[in-house]
Amino acid sequence: MQLMCPVSSIAAAKMFAKIGVGEIYVGVDCNDLGLNNVTFTGRTRVLCSGESVQLSDFSELKEVVDICHSKNIKVNFTANVRNLPEALIDEYIQYVEKGIHAGVDAVIVGSIVALIALKDRYDIQLHSSTFFYPFNKYNVDFFHFFDIKRIILPTALSLVEIKQIVDYIAEKNYDMEVEVFGHFGCSNINGRCNIFNNPPSICRGQFQVYDKSKNNIKSSVNIIDAGKDCTICSLKELNDIGITSLKIMGRGLSLQLVGTLASLYQEALYHLSNGMETSEIRSKLLERANWWENSYCNDNRCMYLDTETSKYYV
C-alpha cells in the first residue's frame, strides 16, 4: 500500500518527491482549451480564498511529471468532472490528450459520458473517481466493462464492505486495483453532495443551536458533519485487505498541512511494512504530533471503523 497526495503547484510536487510518496494526483486549468469558466478536474478552479486547486497550464504538468518520474512517483491526472455535457466532449478529449502527452500514468474519470468517450481510445490506465460512489461489489462488473484499472471507494464504507469489494475482484480475476481515502474526505457521502464550498465548509461548520424560544441550547456544534478523517488505526486492516493506494485529500490546502500529513502517513506506512502493530504506530505518531489526538481521535474521526460518527451519514 502506498501514499497518494494532492498536487496543485510545482512546489507541492517537489515537496512530495522529497517525502517519497508513491503517487500524486493533479489537474490543469482549462484556459489552454479556451475554457475560462470550466473545469474538468472534479473541483472548482479556485477556492474562495483565491487558492488554486490545479496547475495553470500543461507545461507545468510536464514539469510536475518530470519531477515525479525522477523519483519513481506515479502521476494520476484528474479528468473526473462529474457531469460532462455533450457540447464539451471534444474539449474534454483534448484535455485528456494533453495530459497523456505530458506523460501522466493514469487518468481519473468521473462520469459515464467520459468513460464512453475514452473507452478504447488511448493506451493508458483509467481510474474511476469516487463520484461513481461504488457502494458494493456489483459496481465492479460495470467498471470491468470499461476496462477500469482502479476503483476509488467512498469514505462511507466499513472495512467489511471494502473487503467484500476487493475479494469480489479477486474472485472474478479482474485486473483491477482499489484505492481508498486515507485522510480527509466528504463529511457525508462522496459524490452525492452538491454543496461545493470553501473550507471550512458548511458541513464542517460550527453552529449555534436554539430552541423555539430562541434560547441557546448548545454552542459550537457540528450538526451536519459526519466526516471521518483519519486511517491510522485502520492502516493494517486496509493493507491486509489489499488496498493499493491511500489518498490524502487536499488540493488547495496549505503545503504545510498536506506536507505534515504526508510525512506522518509515510512514516506510519514504513512502520507498518516493518511489522509494527497499530497501537505502536499510533503511539509514535502522537509523539510527533501531539495535536492529532484532539483533532481526530477525541471526535471519533476514525475512517472505516465503527464509531458514533458513522451513525450520522446522510
Image (cartoon, grey):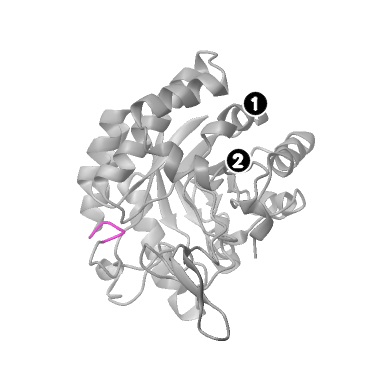
Tell me the residue at 72%/43% (across/down): 165
Above or below, 140 relative to 2: below
Position of 139 with respect to 180 (left or right) is: right
Q: Position of residue 87 (x, y in %)?
A: 46, 80
Under circle 2, the secondary element is strand
Number of marks drawn: 2
Above or below, 96 relative to 1: below
Mark yes or no: residue 21 visible.
no
The residue identified by callout 2 is: 178
Tell me the residue at 37%/51% (across/down): 250
Tell me the residue at 58%/61% (across/down): 188
Residue numbers of the magenta segment = 52-56
Above or below, 122 relative to 178: below
- Quarter residue 270 falls in: top left
The residue identified by callout 1 is: 240
Q: Position of residue 183 (x, y in %)?
A: 47, 44
Q: Nearer the viewer, mark 1 or mark 2?
A: 1
Under circle 1, the secondary element is helix
Mark yes or no: residue 192 visible.
yes
Inspect the image, locate mark 2, and give the three-letter code of the amino acid beneath it.
Val
Q: Position of residue 283 (x, y in %)?
A: 46, 23
- Quarter residue 233 falls in: top right
Position of 166 with respect to 45 (left or right) is: right
Q: Residue 55 magenta-drawn?
A: yes
Front residue of 91/73: it is 73
In whole angstroms, how far apart are the C-alphas of marks 1 and 2?
13 Å
